[in-house]
Image (cartoon, helix red, strand yellow):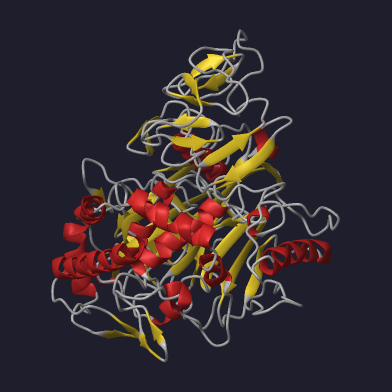
Amino acid sequence: MCRYHLTRCRLWHVFLGTSALLLANCDRWPWEAADEDSDDAPVCASGLVQCDGRCVDLQSDPAHCGDCGNVCPGGLVCSLGACSDACGDGLTNCDSSCVELTTNSAHCGSCGHLCQPGQACEAGRCVGDASGPGDTAADLQAAIDQLTGDIVFSPPNGTFQDSIAVSLSTELSNVDIRYTLDREAPTAASALYDGTPITLTATSHIRAQAFLGETPAGSMGTAVYVARSFDMALDLPLVVIDNHGAGPMSEDNRVFVDGTFMTFELDSGVASLSATPTVATPAAFHVRGQSTAEFDKKPYRVELRDNQGEDADWPVLGMAAESDWVLRGPFADKALIRDAFIYSLGAELGLVAPHFAFCELYLNVEDRPLGEGDYNGVYMMIEPIKNSRNRLDLRQLHAEEPADVDGGYIIRFEWRVENEEPDLLCSGADQCWQYLDLFDPNPSSREQQQFITEYVQGFHNALYPVNPDPASGYPHYIDVPSFVDTVIVNELGRELDSYIRSAYYHKDEGTVLVSGPLWDYNLIFGVGMNTMGVDNLSVEGWQYEQRRDPITNTWFEQLMSDPGFSGSVRARWQELRQGLLASGALDARIDSLAAPLVNAAQRNFMRWPNLTTSQISMFQSPTDDTWEGQLEAMRSWMHARVAWIDSQWM
C-alpha cells in the first residue's frame, strides 16, 4: 500500500484484505490530503476526526490525546482520551494507543485493522459501504468497463435458455464492428456485424472490435453467455463455472483450463441463475490442493482473465477485487464450517486470515447447456495467499533487482510436498528444518534467497539453545504475539498439519518475521488421523509436540520450552477464555456460521451423501447421520478439547 498511495511512508505490519492494513510513520493516509483546509481534505472513517490534516482517534492517539495537538509524554499511552501509564480494562495497546478493538475504526478487531471511510467498526468488524480505495462497487464497474471496452452488448452478460439474440453497438463513429465466437481476438478478416442480432444456442464468448478500415479502433470488448437447461433460485450466492466442454479437470493435471466464471449474489435473500450476474468474465481453472484433491468433491483454483488472457481483478462475493481465488469444498469436514471457524476467529485475534464467503457451485465440464446435475454443493470462496495490494500487502521484490533484498517475503512449510518455489536450506544448527519454501517473491534472485535464508537461520539458531534476550535472541527475529496466537489457534482445534504444512510466515521491509497468514484448517475439531504415530483426534495432548518423519521444524516446541514464551501463551489463553474463547462465544461462532447454511447443507449432502462414512480418503470423520448432528459432534469435541487445555493452562 505504501508504494501506491503514500509518501515518506514505512510499512510496519500488514494484514489480509482491503481494510486490514496497519501503517506507521506515514505522512498521510491514502484518502487524505496534505492540507486540512484544502478542497480534498480527508473524509474520516466513523469515530475519527481531523487533526493537522490527518484522521485520528482522540480517545487513543498519543499525539492527539483528548484534543488535537495534546501529546502524551514519553512512556505514557493514550487511554480513553487521557494520558496514562497503562491501558484500562477492555483496552488494547496498539502502538502506544489504548483502543477498544470492538469499536475502534482504526483498529477494528485487531491492531491496525483499518476501516475504510464510510465504514464503522461494530463487534470488531468493519461494516457499511466504503468510499475509499478498494470500493467494491467502483472496482466492479472498472472490471466491467475493461471487459466490454468500446462495445455495447445487448443484452449484457448472463445465462439463457434455448437461445439468445445479442446486438452489438459502439459510440465510435464511422467504424465497422467485427466479432468472433471462438474466444479469439477479432481481426479485420473476422465476421462483420451487419446490425442483425447474433443468435447463440450454446455457451459462448462474443468478442468484438471496432475497425476503421483494417485498423482496430478503440478497445476490444467481450461478453460471456452461459446456456442452461433449467432455472434455479437458492438462498446462498451461486457460482457458475463452465469450461466449454473441456471435460473433467483431473487432480493429476494442474494446467489451467479456459472457460467462463459467473457469480449471482443474494437479492432479497435469493440468488437466481436467471438474474443478471454480479461477475461474468472469462476465466481459467484447475484442481488444487494435496490430499483434498483426491476427494470426490474437489477444490479449484480460479484465475479471472481479461480480453488479452491476462489477470483481471474482480470483486467477488463482497471481497476486494483480485484475479486469483480458491473454491474449497468442505468434504471430510461434514459440519462445513471448520475452515471458516478458524479464519474468522484468527482474524479477530489479530492474526492474518483470508476473507471468505459461502456459496453453492454449479460446475459444467460437458459440451451441453448447464444442467441441474451440475450442482456441486456448498463451497467457500476464499482469498488465496498473495502479495498484492488487496491481499497481503508487502513490499514487492523483483528478481531483476537482485540487490533489493530487505522485504517483503512469504515463506511456508509444506511437509513432504515438492514445490516449484526455491527451498530455504538450513545449515550448521541442531534439528535443522526441512520443506521450507520461498513462496514470494517468485521468481526471486539468489541474493534475495540468501537474505531470507540467513534471517530465518538467525531465528533458528536463537532457539538452540533458546535465547529469550530481546536484543540477540528469538524476540529479535519474530513478532512474538503472532507466534503466541498461532499456538492458541493450532492447539484449540489440533489441525492435523499444524506447524508443518500450509504453515505460512511473512516478513516485510524493516520488520520481523510474522506468523501467518492462516491457511488450510479443515482437518480439525475431531477430523483427522490416529495412525502411524500421528494423532489429532484425541482431545488430550499437544499438537506442537507431534513430529513427522523427517522432522520439518521444531520452532514451536523450542519456543514452548521457554518459560517466557509459554507463560505468554498461558496468559493469552486465560485472557481469551474471558472473551473470544469463552464457551458461549465459541458456541455463538458455530451458530453464526451455520445459520446461512441450513438449507444449503441439505442440498449439499443430497449431492455428496457421505455423512455416515467414517473414512474419507485417509482421514477419519464423525458419522452422525444429519448435518445438525455433525455440528454437534464438532461442538462436543471442541468443548472437550477446551476443558483439557484449561486443565493445563488455567
Residue 551 location, x and y as percent?
Answer: 57, 83
Q: Residue 621's image quarter?
A: bottom left
* Residue located farthest toward the front when viewing the structure as drawn: 563
Q: Residue 267's image quarter?
A: top left
User: Foreground: 368 or 94?
Assistant: 94
Residue 457: in sight, yes or no? Answer: yes
Quick check: 217 left or right of 80? right
Quick check: 246 left or right of 40? left
* Residue located farthest toward the top when viewing the structure as drawn: 37
* Residue 452 higher or lower than 550, as above or below: above
User: Foreground: 38 or 170?
Assistant: 38
* Residue 33 higher or lower than 300, as above or below: above
Residue 283: in sight, yes or no? Answer: no
Quick check: 184 left or right of 269? right
- Measuring 63% from the left and 25% from the top, which residue is drawn there? 74
Residue 63 location, x and y as percent?
Answer: 59, 20
* Residue located farthest toward the bottom when viewing the structure as drawn: 532
User: Foreground: 148 or 397?
Assistant: 397
Q: Quadrant of the C terminus?
A: bottom left
Q: Quadrant of the N terminus?
A: top right
Residue 489 location, x and y as percent?
Answer: 41, 61
Quick check: 435 left or right of 626? right
Task: Give the number of callouts.
Answer: 0
- Measuring 44% from the left and 30% from the top, which residue is drawn there? 105
- Measuring 59% from the left and 60% from the top, which residue is drawn there? 505
* Residue 295 higher or lower than 191, as above or below: below
Residue 19 location, x and y as percent?
Answer: 49, 39
